[in-house]
């Protein structure tokens, strides 16, 4: 996430099951929405791209859900 070009990217939402991490992200980016469930983030029609940065054993499921929900948007998976 930190490698995204800042001049062409707006991070508008984060999802994490860890509330402390969500609070820390919100403190750094007050305008971003935060979701404790990634499926709520994916249901947001304002999201045009998704970065999956979850543990590797969850990548496939999160990526499939993102592709299904976003209908052809941009998906990046971090290892």
Image (cartoon, helix red, strand yellow):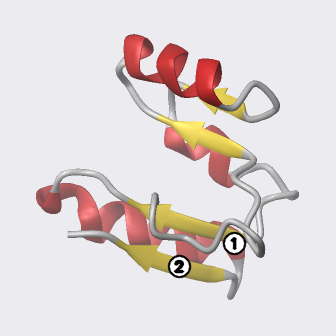
Mark 1 secondary-structure assignment: helix
User: x%, y% of residue 9?
Assistant: 73, 68
Does 33 appear above or below 56? above
User: x%, y% of residue 34?
Assistant: 64, 28
Q: Is residue 57 left or right of residue 32?
A: left
Q: Residue furthest right?
A: 46
Q: Nearer the viewer, residue 3 or 47?
A: 3
Mark 2 is surrounded, within 10 Å at the Cα level, by few (under 14), some (14 to 19) or many (20 or more) other residues, namely some
User: x%, y% of residue 67?
Assistant: 56, 77
Q: Is residue 42 left or right of residue 37?
A: right
Asked whether the residues under the numbered discs 1 and 2 touch, taking CB atoms below 8 Å apart as contact, a structural biologist would say yes
- Which of the two marks, 1 or 2, is nearer to us in this view? 2
Q: Residue furthest front?
A: 7
Q: Is residue 32 left or right of residue 38?
A: right
At a point 62% along the width and 83% down the height, the residue shown is 74
Which numbered circle lies on residue 70? 1
Q: CA distance from mark 1 to mark 2?
A: 9 Å
Q: Residue furthest bottom?
A: 72
Which numbered circle lies on residue 75? 2
Does 37 appear above or below 22? below
At a point 62% along the width and 18% down the height, the residue shown is 27
């Amino acid at each position: 996430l930190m490698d995204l070009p800042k001049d062409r990217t707006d991070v508008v939402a984060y999802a994490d099951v860890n509330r402390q991490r969500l609070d820390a992200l919100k403190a750094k980016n007050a305008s971003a929405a935060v979701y404790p469930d990634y499926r709520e983030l994916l249901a947001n029609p304002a999201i045009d791209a998704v970065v999956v940065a979850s543990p590797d054993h969850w990548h496939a499921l999160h990526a499939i859900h993102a592709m299904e929900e976003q209908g052809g948007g941009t998906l990046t998976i971090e290892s």
